[in-house]
């Protein structure tokens, strides 16, 4: 009798898991029909499983309309948790089946636009051809997200880290620098000190609607110099500022990895070389897990090498790991 009860409990758990997977796939694919194709069942079976799940939970997960599925607030919260459950289960399966040599599955990566466009994108074909079983879903945004709530596997971050329960793997260090097109400097002259910048058209990076200050460390002085850029063009997009500098619109304040090719080709040249800009670390962050999925491990190894190369302009890189204590991320 006890054995029968155990079998019944296992069957009930598997049944609930199937319902949860149907729910997650419906959210990911936007409707029951595409989710059904992914699960190799009928659309009515997906609908039935989700209805059973709603009945078990006592909540409504979807607002169903004739046009689309809309998650309720309860549905959004439950979806974030279910994603992590399925991810952990998939990681455990990979570990048991020795699939670490052949990583598979959906890999969700979140990165700032500048890192994604200028460093990740040019190299992604190499990564995906090396791991054809991985489906990469890359989101580029400059806002900080909670990877557990968003269902993200790896976050790439540029700058100082806030304390969090995430594991942080350092990829490199980059430095801000001033640069301009030779044609601009020929017309307007070359600044020799931070004070000279006041006479130049400086291209500012917009942060909260206003150009962010430039912080320079002048050799021979202890206190950094803070400069408020003023000019005729500003943008919240780093690659756009780089392109504006190449066009000769003014002096830009950019991360060194952003202008490697332009400096090598001569399209841009450094200015104020004796004044050191701020250093910023680059990290990969990921949730702590007993079973790190093979696809995550493969991606981490890939970006360690990638950013080590991308930040080679006088920039050290490290593969060390550490974790943080609080939950502010």
Image (spheres, rainbow, N blue to C red):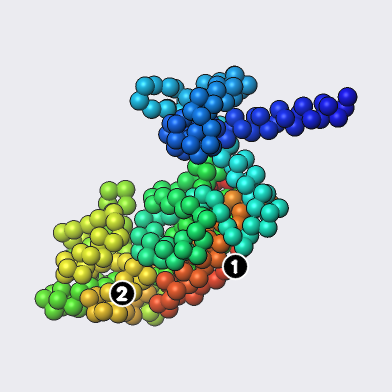
* Residue pointed to by mark 1: 320
Residue in the picture at 42% in, 71% down = 310
| Residue at figure coordinates x 76%, y 28% from the top left | 9
Quadrant of the frame with the N terminus: top right
Q: Residue at horizontal 61%, vertical 32%?
A: 18
Using the image, tell me which numbered label, if any, was put on residue 261: 2
In the picture, measured across the screen, residue 232 lies left or right of residue 174, that is left
Specify few, some or many for label 2: CA neighbours under 10 Å numbering under 14, 14-19, or 20 or more: few
Q: Can residue 61 be seen in this view?
A: no
The residue positioned farthest toward the right in the image shown? 1
Q: Nearer the viewer, residue 23 or 220?
A: 23
Closer-to-camera residue (237/290): 290
Q: Residue 304's x, y, as percent? A: 52, 67
Task: Pinpoint residue 267: horizontal percent, then vertical percent.
Answer: 22, 76
Viewer-closest of 206 and 98 = 98
Decide: is 77 above or below 93.
above
């Amino acid at each position: 009798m006890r054995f029968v009860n155990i079998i019944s409990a296992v069957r009930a758990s598997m049944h609930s898991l199937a319902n949860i997977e149907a729910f997650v796939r419906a959210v990911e694919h936007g409707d029951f029909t595409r989710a059904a194709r992914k699960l190799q069942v009928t659309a009515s079976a997906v609908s039935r499983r989700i209805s059973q799940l709603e009945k078990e939970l006592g909540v409504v997960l979807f607002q169903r309309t004739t046009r689309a599925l809309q998650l309720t607030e309860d549905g959004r919260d439950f979806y974030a948790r279910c994603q992590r459950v399925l991810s952990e289960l998939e990681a455990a399966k990979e570990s048991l089946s020795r699939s670490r040599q052949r990583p598979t599955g959906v890999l969700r990566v979140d990165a700032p636009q500048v890192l994604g466009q200028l460093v990740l994108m040019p190299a992604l074909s190499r990564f995906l051809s090396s791991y054809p079983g991985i489906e990469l879903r890359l989101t580029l945004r400059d806002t900080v997200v909670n990877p557990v709530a968003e269902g993200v596997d790896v976050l790439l971050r540029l700058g100082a880290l806030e304390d969090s329960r995430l594991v942080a793997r350092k990829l490199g260090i980059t430095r801000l620098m001033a640069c301009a097109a030779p044609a601009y400097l020929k017309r307007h002259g070359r600044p020799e000190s931070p004070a000279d910048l006041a006479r130049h058209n400086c291209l500012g990076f917009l942060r909260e609607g206003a150009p962010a200050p430039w912080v320079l460390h002048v050799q021979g002085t202890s206190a950094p110099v803070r400069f408020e850029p003023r000019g005729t063009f500003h943008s919240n997009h780093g690659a756009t500022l780089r392109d504006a500098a190449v066009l000769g619109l003014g002096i830009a304040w950019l991360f060194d990895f952003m202008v490697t090719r332009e400096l090598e080709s001569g399209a841009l040249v450094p200015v104020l070389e004796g004044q050191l800009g701020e250093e910023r670390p680059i990290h990969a962050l990921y949730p702590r897990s007993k079973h790190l999925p093979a696809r995550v491990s493969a991606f981490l190894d890939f970006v360690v090498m990638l950013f080590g190369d991308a930040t080679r302009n006088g920039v050290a890189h490290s593969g060390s790991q550490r974790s943080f204590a609080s939950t502010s991320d």
